[in-house]
Amino acid sequence: MEHLGWLGAAIIAIGGCAASTGDGGEQQSVPSADAGAEDAGPTGIFGDSGGAACTIGMPDRTCTPGANAGCTTGTQSCQLPQQHGEIKSGVWGDCTCACTPGAKTFATPGSFTFTVPNFKTLKVEAWGGGGGGQGARQTGSPTAGGASSFNATLVAGGGESGDSRNGGAASGGGTNTTGGQGGPAIYYPQLGGQAAGGDAPLGGAGGAGVRHALDACSGGDGNDGVAPGGGGASDWACEGQWQIGQGWGETGGGGGGGAYTTRTYSTSELMVGSVVTIVVGAGGLGSRGEQTSGSGGGGRNPGYYTGGDGAAGQVKVEWTCP
């Protein structure tokens, strides 16, 4: 060092290591004070650019990526080992978004926001709400199920009410399947019953259409659809001239099932970090039908038979990691 003078000392300082000779005469490299500061591990320098010094074998550390990275927390790894005697030195790689595979289901009717996580593939499935069942000799009308959607472009329509009975329609997916149709309104000689609600494809069943013997003039509320997306069944009632032994069961129409759609996104189609709106469609309400044959009466309209309600829709998001 004495022969190098001030210029040699400066060169060694800039290089970030000082040369020393061991017992065997072999030169070894040791990190400088500045490199040691960069080597601080999980609490070290943060940023989207790598390049700071590190020692190979150190664990990955948490970092904060750049504003356009699509996530708020990432990781850095110590990379590019170089042998300097007995010490391997490297540099921290770029800060990359952390990724954890997962799934999330939205099953409550309403509007929600979803921040797109870091992912490799992201699959979305959506079901529309089921339509409400029709009440025999109804007062008012049943309502249709609401549409469910992801990012406003993937849409599963709600089932129509028991007045029209059609299943919902879907659009925007790789697979788009129409909901099942509700059963028709029928008069049953000597037999009572309910018109079943339509099924939601790969989802909930429609409210069951149950048949009843008319040994006495009676009736009941329709069965509700099963989530996600099953249509409500009609109510059931009867009319009869029991003095001559004749009676007829009567029923409204079953509500249509919600539609089903699915799509798998890549990162070129859906930006990591973007905020997407998710809508879950509500189930339709069954209409009020005939007055009950007995006193009182239960259900949503006491004293009257009522068509079954359609079930709410659903949106399910599932993602994998690189």
Image (tube, grey):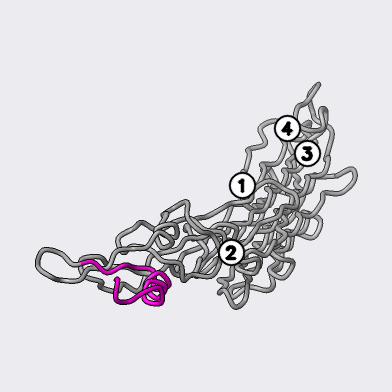
What amino acid is found at the position of numbered circle 3 in the picture? Thr
The reply to whether callout 2 and callout 1 are in contact (CB within 8 Å) is no
Residue 186 seen in the current view: no
The reply to whether callout 1 and callout 4 are in contact (CB within 8 Å) is no
Q: Secondary structure at mark 1?
A: loop
Looking at the figure, which quarter contains the N terminus?
Answer: bottom left
Tag shown at residue 218: 4
Pick whichever of labels 2 and 4 is earlier in the sequence. 2
**Residue 17 counted in the magenta span:** yes
Q: CA distance from mark 1 to mark 4?
A: 25 Å
The reply to whether callout 2 and callout 4 are in contact (CB within 8 Å) is no
- Of circles 1 and 3, the one toward us is 1
Does 296 appear above or below 136?
above
Residue 107, percent from left and from top: 64, 48
What amino acid is found at the position of numbered circle 4 in the picture? Ser
Pick whichever of labels 2 and 1 is earlier in the sequence. 2
Q: CA distance from mark 2 to mark 3?
A: 35 Å
The reply to whether callout 4 and callout 3 are in contact (CB within 8 Å) is no
Tag shown at residue 124: 2
For the point 86% across and 44% down, the residue is 138
Tag shown at residue 148: none
Pick whichever of labels 1 and 3 is earlier in the sequence. 1
Pick whichever of labels 2 and 3 is earlier in the sequence. 2
- Of circles 2 and 4, the one toward us is 2
Tell me the quarter of the picture where residue 65 sits.
bottom right
Per the image, the residue denoted by label 1 is 226
For the point 34% across and 68% down, the residue is 17
Outermost residue, left side? 24
Per the image, the residue denoted by label 3 is 306
